[in-house]
Image: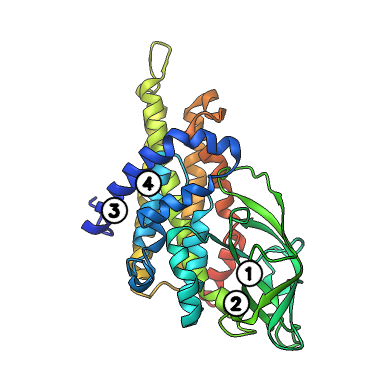
Amino acid sequence: MRRTVFNEDHEAFRETIRDFIAAEVVPVYDEWLAAGQAPRDFYRKLGELGVFGIEVPEEFGGAGETSFKFQAVITEECARAGVSFGGSGVHTGLCLPYLLAYCDDEQRKRWLPDFVSGDMMTAIAMTEPGTGSDLAGMKTTAKLSEDGTHYVLNGAKTFITGGVHADRVIVCARTAPATPEDRRAGISLLVVDTKSEGYAVGRKLEKLGLKTSDTAELSFTDVKVPVEDLLGEEGKGFSYLGQNLPQERLAIAVGAYAQASAAIGFAKAYVQDRTVFGQSVASFQNTKFVLADCKAEVDAAQAVVDRALDAHDAGELTAADAASAKLFCTDVAARVIDKCLQLHGGYGYMLEYPIARLYADNRVNRIYGGTSEVMRSIIAKSMGL
């Protein structure tokens, strides 16, 4: 079936991204994997290409687009090539929506031009050791100084993607204690300069997959954060976080669909080339049936993703819609990638093959952005259950 979710501008952008990946990423990707992160200068190349400024207003150096579909194109093309852009997805997919929505005029002028160029990379620090998905249970505090000029930040965060390279981190912290009526009260967002005294990057965490994204532990010891770096209103942080979750979950759904589609491509190429018992693996009925099943599932995931992308661009994607898309697409990807790895036989277990890396990268889709169990709870609640 003809795909209609993308227009001519999206497809022209796709060709640009595909050429960029072939020239700038594929030849050096093994070096990134060995280093455990993409190099810092690569992000400036993405800035020069215009990737970071797609949704940023033109007055700050961006393109002023409002469609999330350009980010979906990047996700699909990275999966197709078996690569990633490191931690930069957090920069544009998670951090930018907060900056666009809650920065005041002075902050926009101060931060957005460097955001677009890649001279200022960002990350967001929500999760803490021991709290996991329970953001209301966070212990990190930011106390306003007596003279009212700055906050004093103390605490620790973990699983912070982009945390090694980040120049500014949106830190979720308690500026006031929770109340008996509302555990979520008193949380604020601070855009913290990583060069601040008392700010420290701990371990760069070794993950099962996503090897080229730098994921770190962070700690804050009496870090002074100017009040001018408060994002939005004090105490409104938890509600801000909830408003961006549908897009975050849509992005994960798109990534899962793209990974599953790429897995079929990798498997098809492998079984057509691989010979056993005097004939290609592709000629066996089992191979044909497995790949046919995979394609049917991926076709369904594509339909879900495309409908969600249209709904998001129209401002109609609900929290339950996004949860449903994430749950379905991540489950499909898990099944499809596992079957495609199986078709590779022993070589599917070798990390030199993209299907093995894809298998490891895919596993986190059912965990981050809200676990599959949380998605089921959201969907059930929307059903009145």
Residue position marked by numbered label 2 in the rendering: 229
Q: Is tag 2's residue or tag 4's residue first in the polypeptide sequence? A: 4
Looking at the picture, how far across and down is residue 84, in whole percent? 47, 45
Q: Is tag 3's residue or tag 1's residue first in the polypeptide sequence? A: 3
Residue position marked by numbered label 3 in the rendering: 13
Q: Are marks 3 and 4 in contact (CB under 8 Å)?
A: no
Q: Which mark is nearer the camera, 3 or 2?
A: 2
Q: Which mark is nearer the camera, 2 or 4?
A: 2
Looking at the picture, how far across and down is residue 142, in whole percent? 73, 77
Q: Is residue 293 above or below residue 233?
A: above
Quick one: label 4, few (<14), some, or many (20+) residues within 10 Å? many
Residue type, mark 3 in image: Phe
Q: Which mark is nearer the camera, 4 or 1?
A: 1
* Badge 3 element: helix
Q: Is tag 2's residue or tag 1's residue first in the polypeptide sequence? A: 1
Residue type, mark 2 in image: Asp
Q: Are marks 4 and 1 in contact (CB under 8 Å)?
A: no
Residue type, mark 4 in image: Glu
Real-space Cα separation, disc 2 to disc 1, in angstroms: 7 Å
* Badge 1 element: strand
Quick one: label 3, few (<14), some, or many (20+) residues within 10 Å? some
Judging depth in this view, the residue of 206 and 165 nearest the camera is 165
| Residue at x 56%, y 82% (from the top left corner) | 232
Name the mark on residue 192.
Answer: 1
Looking at the picture, how far across and down is residue 200, in whole percent? 72, 59
Q: Is residue 126 above or below residue 213?
A: below
Q: Is tag 3's residue or tag 2's residue first in the polypeptide sequence? A: 3
Residue position marked by numbered label 4 in the rendering: 77
Q: Is residue 133 above or below residue 362?
A: below
Q: Are marks 2 and 1 in contact (CB under 8 Å)?
A: yes
